[in-house]
Amino acid sequence: MTSGQPKPLPYLTADLPGIGGRLKDHPADFVVEEIPAYEPSGAGEHLYLWIEKHDLPHDVLLRRLSKTLEISPNDIGTAGIKDRRAITRQYVSVPARAAARVELLDSPELRVLRTGLHGNKLRTGHQRGNRFTITVREVNEDADQRAVAIADVVRKIGIPNYYGEQRFGREGQTLSLGLDLLAGRATPRDIPFSKRKFLLRLALSSVQSDLFNQALAARLSDGLLQTVLLGDVMDVIESGGKFIVDDVAREQARLDEGLLAVTGPMFGVKMLTPNGVPAEREAMILEQSGLGSADFANYAQLMSGARRPYLIRPGDLVVTPVEQGIQFELSLPAGTYATVLLREFLKTDDAGDNPQGAGRTDESVDTPSESDA
């Protein structure tokens, strides 16, 4: 298997000193609340459970639901996987016939806060994002001033929409597998059958994610992250629609107003490809990886391709000094990472429990369509 260790990524606010500190010393330091795409209608064959879990891994949650409610794991629906070392609130769906046993779920690690019936099973992506309340401890002495300076930039520009490190597996093992699969050095049969469906998607998605990170890092390093180029694929923030730039001045003005975002590649056979210089830049990223566009054809159903905004603006970002350190309150759309934002503030590799990995608003593995924001 080839090496798939992700490369270091540049900061947007490299000229501003970080606050230091430790992340996720305690589960209560990282509170995540899902923003549902919709609420249960009150009728249907599926029971939605609004749950709160404390320091509970997703796989353990699913096993507990399955065992206690006496249902198959395949009958359980979630919009996304939430962090383990955290207090998280989210919807899960189960068959309505399990309603009589729901009260048996309550424990110190898991509480059911409310329930409601709905007509469909909850599925990956059925959320708009998440709200976070995060405390960073043991920060530098002047952390409050540093945090304010960085927050001013983030509110104005946004943050690089990197994928977090857990996307690539421990020491890049998942990324390595994905590269080997695409290059033909491995096949799905090399993955144990019990893990094949999940790990195959994860490995292929990790390659897309790493290539996107590289394209984003190159654009940032070249000072082009906020510059519209002729041929760029733009994202209309309000609708999620995509289009190719043919009038730079017009679209630069709309980007400066916060109406648009430049997008980067999630390579695949159906990905909307830019023109001109942006196309050349993306082709170079692909060439440097040792892959070609034809390599994605064998897995077209699992990685059809998409575009992802290079910058994302957090909602309602509030930075507050507290006795323990600095508290952050914010919301992020699905598919983005709270710790990628925190990375700009901490600027340290010693940020507690998996600092680059935890905190994505949706830990599920997916390859979104072109219309997804």
Image: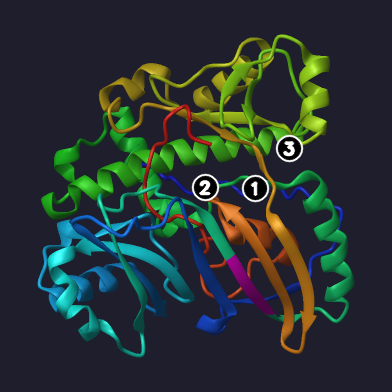
Q: Which residue is mark 2?
A: 6
Q: Which residue is mark 3?
A: 220
Q: Is residue 185 magenta?
A: no
CA–CA distance in space, label 1 to label 3: 10 Å
The location of residue 142, given as percent across then percent down, is 88, 77
Circle number at residue 9: 1
Q: Residue at x 78, y 15 (%)?
A: 248
Identify residue type, mark 2.
Answer: Pro
Give the side of residue 189 with respect to residue 331, left or right: left
Q: Are marks 1 and 2 in contact (CB under 8 Å)?
A: yes
The location of residue 216, given as percent across then percent down, is 64, 36
Identify residue type, mark 3.
Answer: Leu
Q: Is residue 135 magenta?
A: yes
Quadrant of the image occupied by residue 249: top right
Q: Which residues are the magenta region?
A: 132-136
Looking at the image, residue 178 lies above or below residue 110: above
